[in-house]
Image: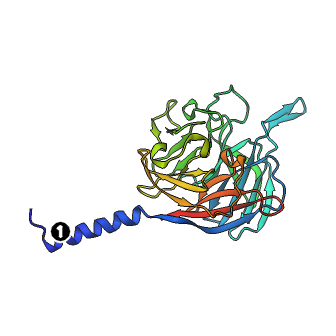
Amino acid sequence: MQFTPKILSALALSCLALSAQAEILPEAEVGVKIPLVKKPTTRPMTVAYLPGNQHYYIADGGLAPMGSEFEAPISKSEVHAFTADGSYVNSAKPGYDNRSLYYNPNSGKLETITYNISSAVGFSPNTGIYSLDIGDKGQLLDTSGDVAQFNPAFGDAGTIPSYDPVSKHYYAKQDRGNIVFVVDTKQREKLREIKLDFAKAQVVHDDVSDHYIAFTGVAGNELALLDVDHKAVLIFDLNGQFVGKSALPATMKLRSQNHFNGLGYTNGMLFVYHEPEGEFGTYYGFKVVK
């Protein structure tokens, strides 16, 4: 086959496009810092950004819904609102044991996924996916709405699923391993499993986040996993192939809880909770892929 200048030009453009898609930052860049201004009600879980009002929202989790003859079974875990530059707005108690918090552009809502979304440890009230109501000034309200009920397809009770708004699929990392379930909430069984190549990434399951893998939306670099022990973010594609990594600052002091909570991916950044910084800890937003 003879390669004409037109074909060579097209091939060059294709290579440039693939290169742009596959760019991983060797060293993570800090995009935003959000210092917490009050002690988390429980454990700081995940972060979401709403482009419409340019606010960040941070969810606590870890308090199961408890009730009595005088009180409905709701969790006392709070969700906190911040402006785009990290200034505190307010906190509210929508009533859920939050695990994953994200903006859903298909519904235009801030949504939360609770602990035990799969009902793996038995049924409990206020379990599922819910939308959280936001006020005109970006403040969180105590009211919410139903999105989806519990679904066994999510697997482990503690999973912190991430959401792809294009396919409308969720990626639910399973505990103590390299398996990620791909979930469509219209189905009661997982669509498929992704097996992450830990051998090529040179990690074992004890090194990395136990419950959470981020969906980045970047072609070829779709999945991002925090390597706690080596202070890095590992990048995989949707087939589980290891693509590369982005180093976090060596000065960060990650702790055991970073294996289980204090994470999120929103506004093009991976968020990591840095407990030693500030009175109540600080969330860092890192740019790791482009």
Query: Do we see residue 211 in this rendering?
Result: no
**Residue 105, quarter of the rendered image:** bottom right
Q: Position of residue 150 (x, y in %)?
A: 62, 33
Q: Nearer the viewer, residue 286 or 205?
A: 205
Q: Amino acid at mark 1?
A: Ile
**Residue lying at 69% horizontally and 47% vertically, measured from the top left:** 261
Query: Do we see residue 41 in this rendering?
Result: yes
**Residue lying at 80% horizontally and 53% vertically, measured from the top left:** 92
Say few, some or many: other residues with alpha carbon within 10 Å of mark 1 (under 14 / 14 to 19 / 20 or more): few
Q: Is residue 149 left or right of residue 278?
A: left
The N terminus - image quarter: bottom left
**Residue at image mark 1:** 7
**Residue 287, quarter of the rendered image:** bottom right
**Residue furthest to the right:** 70
Colour basis: rainbow
**Residue furthest to the top:** 122
**Residue lying at 13% horizontally and 68% vertically, measured from the top left:** 3
Q: Position of residue 16 (x, y in %)?
A: 33, 68
Which structural element holds mark 1? helix
Q: Position of residue 21 (x, y in %)?
A: 40, 62
Q: Is residue 171 left or right of residue 92?
A: left
**Residue furthest to the bottom:** 5
Q: Nearer the viewer, residue 272 or 124?
A: 272
**Residue lying at 61% horizontally and 56% vertically, measured from the top left:** 231
**Residue furthest to the left:** 1
Q: Position of residue 270 (x, y in %)?
A: 59, 58
Q: Nearer the viewer, residue 197 or 213?
A: 197
Question: How many numbered callouts?
Answer: 1
Q: Is residue 179 left or right of residue 123?
A: left
Residue 69 lies, with reference to residue 248, above or below; the image says above
